[in-house]
Image (cartoon, helix red, strand yellow):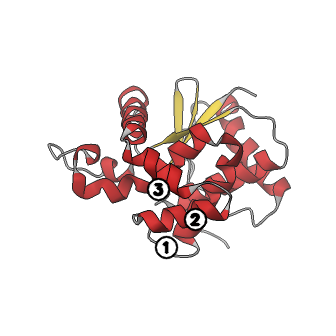
Amino acid sequence: MKPFAVTWDYRCPFARNAHEHLALALASGADWEVAFLPFSLSQAHVPEGGAPVWDDPDKAGDLLALAAGVVVRDQYPGLFLDAHMALFTARHDEGLDLRLPEVVASVLERVGVPGDKVLAEVASGAPVEEIRRAHEHAVGQLEVFGVPTFIVDDRAVFVRLVSRPAGDAALALRTMEGVLDLFETMPDLNEFKYTKLSF
């Protein structure tokens, strides 16, 4: 299977669903080369002519967890999937406010990541610059508009999964393989959306 990338922002429940499938499949042995790319939903909703979120001090909290995820991805790669899913869980299952440094640090500490060191790196500004670079590339080169977007070569596809794997690794693997197979088997399929859900 070709290497692929997938965007994330911890604010999106559909990103949580897709990344749960992906993380579980990887943890269960899926042999994929995956790049995790930060994408700011706050920036995606800035009105035309508005200040970019990375230049707006009032929006620093919106980028905090995403920046922490970038630090863990780059500096603690062996703990990334655990920290990644812990941050999604904190936001969507526990209702925690990931704009607060103490909350982000606590979530990271739960999975063995030194929260204080991650926050210190976030404060350096380098992770936010990485978010900016990744976001602007995704928008400018691939017309990405949201999360989760899967990227293979120069093709980007926004995917909205409504269910979670609930610990079922076989389901997670099937789901991800189904998404990725569409890149090869249905390149002209632009939209496939049920009018109502049956579950």
Q: Residue furthest bottom?
A: 94
Q: Position of residue 77 (x, y in %)?
A: 66, 41
**Residue 96, numbered label:** 1
Amino acid bearing label 3: Ala
Question: Which mark's residue is nearer the viewer, 1 or 2?
Answer: 2
Residue 5 in the image: above or below residue 44: above
Residue occupying the point 75% across, 42% down: 177
Residue occupying the point 59% across, 35% down: 5
Residue annotated with mark 2: 107
Label 3, label 2: how far apart the Cα atoms are: 10 Å
Q: Position of residue 197 (x, y in %)?
A: 61, 68
Indicate the secondary structure of the residue bearing disc 3. helix
Indicate the secondary structure of the residue bearing disc 1. loop
Residue occupying the point 38% across, 48% down: 123
Answer with the quarter of the image where residue 30 lies.
top right
Q: Position of residue 181 (x, y in %)?
A: 72, 36
Foreground residue, 129 or 167? 129
Indicate the secondary structure of the residue bearing disc 2. helix
Amino acid bearing label 1: Leu
Residue annotated with mark 3: 65
Answer with the quarter of the image where residue 75 lies.
top right
Q: Are marks 1 and 2 in contact (CB under 8 Å)?
A: yes
Q: If you read the primary sequence from the N terminus, does the residue marked by circle 3 or circle 2 appear first?
A: 3
Q: Residue furthest left?
A: 49
Foreground residue, 157 or 93? 93
- Residue 95 in view in this figure: yes
Q: Position of residue 170 (x, y in %)?
A: 85, 54
Task: Point out the image quarter for the N terminus.
Answer: top right
Q: If you read the primary sequence from the N terminus, does the residue marked by circle 1 or circle 2 appear first?
A: 1
Residue 169 in the image: above or below residue 32: below
